[in-house]
Image (cartoon, grey):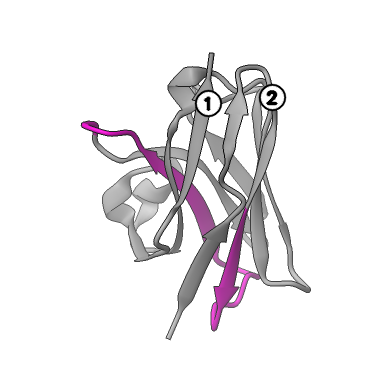
Amino acid sequence: QVQLEESGGSSVRAGGSLTLSCAASDYPFSGNALGWFRQAPGKEREGVAAKHLGGGGGILTYYADSVKGRFTIYEDHAKSTVYLLMNSLKPEDTAMYYCAAGALDADWTRLEVKSWMYWGRGTQVTVSS
């Protein structure tokens, strides 16, 4: 059974950086997609970044407009781990961050929450001003 475990969340000052990790079990990276989502208190979960990891479909990466140029999604196939590098953090980036895998339909490229089968439990990121 696919399992996802996030780590790396912390409290940082605005302008700082963090790297989140998502360790995946029983999930082949090649040919599949992985994504990062976040949910702030009182708000709906939203997509942050997603990436298709080769296997004939090429390497396709998608970012929410709010994080473009600041966040980078990348992976280590040998470690079965996907990362989210977050630079120039803002207070509005404060949220619980979740890793997702198992794209269910083509809307995964639009960072739709409904388009993912597997979810981790999340890691908290708090950005203070």
**Marks 2 and 1, the one that precedes in the sequence:** 2
**From mark 2 to mark 1, how far is it between C-alphas?**
8 Å
Q: Where is 118 relative to 110, above or below?
A: below
User: Horizontally, is 5 left or right of 70 in the view?
Assistant: left
- Residue 30 left/right relative to 106: right
Residue 44 placement (x, y as % from top left): 24, 36
Residue 90 picture location, percent across and down:
54, 18
Labels 2 & 1 near each other (Cβ < 8 A) = yes
Please state which amino acid type lies under the numbered disc 2. Gly
Under mark 1, the amino acid is: Val
Residue, x 32% and y 55% (percent of image)?
A: 115
- Relative to 70, 127 lies left or right: left
Image disc number at residue 127: 1
Q: Is residue 107 left or right of residue 49?
A: left
Rate crowding at label 2 as few (under 14), some (14 to 19) or many (20 or more) other CA atoms within 10 Å: some
Residue occupied by mark 2: 16
Specify whether residue 22 is painted magenta.
Answer: yes
Indicate the secondary structure of the residue bearing disc 1: strand
Which residue: 33% across, 33% down?
Answer: 40
Read off the magenta span.
21-43
Q: Note whether residue 55 is visible.
A: no
Indicate whether residue 24 is drawn in magenta. yes
Q: In which quarter of the image is the N terminus?
A: bottom left
* Residue 39: quadrant of the picture: top left
